[in-house]
Image (cartoon, rainbow, N blue to C red):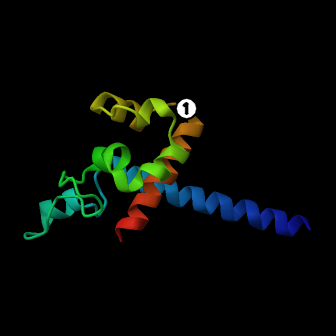
Amino acid sequence: MNKRIENRKLLEVAKYQRCQTTLCSFRCNNTKIPSVKAKFYPGETPYCLKCEEQLIADGYHLLLVCQEFAFVRAEFFPPYFRHYPSLLKFSQLMSTKNPDLLKNVAKFSDFIIEQLK
């Protein structure tokens, strides 16, 4: 029984570590989101392919603005960050010291990267 509990904890830690890696990549612009791919590959479009607004798909757009992720965003972020998004709120979100919010940002950024593959 104890072995099973230990295995579950290890799986949770591994999943959270993957989310942390994704969050670090997101912060450093080391992802394959459209705005980053467009910098390095000619012919790639920097616009969001998920929504119809034709906005550049950078971290700000994907985390706070894109309507395709609105319902999922509601599960991870408090209303303060979801309503009237701004660059100040994005900066606060990416540099938060709140461990629960930081974990949610990591999980949501991992979800976004998985959806864009």
Residue positioned most to the front: 52
**Quick check: 70 above or below 34?**
above
Question: Residue 77: percent from the left, percent from the top?
Answer: 50, 40
Residue positioned most to the left: 42
Q: Nearer the viewer, residue 8 or 72?
A: 72
Q: The N terminus is located in which quarter?
A: bottom right
| Amino acid type at image mark 1 | Asn
Question: Residue 60: percent from the left, percent from the top?
Answer: 30, 44
Residue positioned most to the right: 1
Q: Nearer the viewer, residue 115 or 84?
A: 84
Q: The C terminus is located in which quarter?
A: bottom left
> Tag 1: Cα neighbours inside 10 Å, few (<14), some, or many (≥20)?
few
Tell how many labels. Answer: 1
Q: Nearer the viewer, residue 104 or 86?
A: 86
The residue located at (18%, 58%) in the rendering is 47
**Quick check: 89 above or below 28?**
above
The residue located at (19%, 52%) in the rendering is 56
Place residue 103 in its image quadrant.
top right
Question: Residue 95: percent from the left, percent from the top?
Answer: 41, 34
Label 1 element class: loop
The residue located at (40%, 66%) in the rendering is 115
Q: From the viewer's perspective, is 36 left or right of 71?
A: left
**Quick check: 4 above or below 36?**
below
Q: From the viewer's perspective, is 89 left or right of 72?
A: left
Question: Residue 107: percent from the left, percent from the top?
Answer: 51, 53
The residue located at (28%, 32%) in the rendering is 87
Q: Nearer the viewer, residue 66 or 116?
A: 66
Q: From the viewer's perspective, is 42 left or right of 100?
A: left
Residue on which the image places disc 1 = 98
